[in-house]
Amino acid sequence: IIKNNNWIFFNNSRYIEFPSYKKIQNIDIKSFKQIDSFSDSCPFAYFFDKNNVYFTDSRTFTKVLSASVNSFILFDWVLWDNLIWKDKNAIFYKNKKIINSDSDSFIHIVWNFYKDNQNVYLLSFFGKWLVILDDVDSKTFSINKEISNLEESQGYSKRNTFYFKDDKFYYKLCEKCWFNISWNWNYWREKLEYVFKLEKSKQEFDFQMLDA
């Protein structure tokens, strides 16, 4: 971000050697400031002016829709570089509002699990996704056991298996994350892939690792 008295510019180039600056429109320059991310290594940044909150991932610069400027703050317990924020009304993940989330009751439970008075959430590997676990009752949710497995293959992959329950069912959640690496002309290209599978049963699951 480059700012002067008249304009604000954003570098949306992937390459440091070849910057490409784009003028940001409809910004109040006088009140424009960065929100402290609390992490020097964080690849994401948040800004605000008197009207809006803004988000950048170093490639894009977007408005955080529906965010309250006066109450937008970092969530107290954060994994993966400060991706979860809240205002007086809702929870925000990166630049998106989590529909039907409740900021007053939102808490971290254990490991990568969060909940509010309506939903249970899983923050996936590397903080790439915030997944809502459909139909899991947040009021009676509890963890039974977690199994993790780290694998080295072409690139990097990891699997987690979580066992949890509510007052109606036992659940088994298997998640897997890996890099697909390919050669594209003169450089390696990495694409992060993620899948998860949620099963439920009236009977408790055997504790074992299964492929997602």
Image (tube, rainbow, N blue to C red):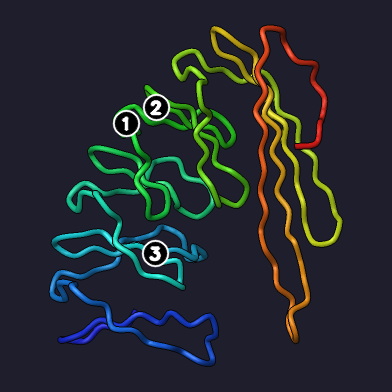
Q: Which mark is residue 189?
A: none
Q: Identify the amino acid type marked 3.
A: Ala
Q: State which tag comes first along the sequence, 2 or 3.
A: 3
Q: State which tag comes first along the sequence, 2 or 1.
A: 1
Q: 10 Å neighbourhood of mark 1: few (<14), some, or many (≥20)?
A: many
Q: 10 Å neighbourhood of mark 2: few (<14), some, or many (≥20)?
A: many
Are dots 2 and 1 in contact, CB under 8 Å? yes
Q: Secondary structure at mark 3?
A: strand
Question: Residue sitting at 30 percent across and 48 percent down?
Answer: 73
Question: Residue sitting at 75 percent across and 46 percent down?
Answer: 158
Compute the Cα span from label 2 to label 3.
25 Å
For the C terminus, the image quarter is top right
Compute the Cα span from label 3 to label 1.
23 Å
On screen, 191 above or below 113?
A: below
Residue 181 location (% of width, % of height):
76, 66
Residue that carries the numbered disc 2 in the rendered image? 116
Which of the 4 quarters of the picture holds residue 119?
A: top left
Residue 50 location (% of width, % of height):
14, 62
Q: Identify the amino acid type marked 2.
A: Asp
Q: Would residue 27 appear left or right of 212 to someone viewing this image?
A: left
Q: Identify the amino acid type marked 1.
A: Asp
Residue that carries the numbered disc 1 in the rendered image? 102
Residue that carries the numbered disc 3 in the rendered image? 45
Q: State which tag comes first along the sequence, 3 or 1.
A: 3
Residue 77 location (% of width, % of height):
45, 40
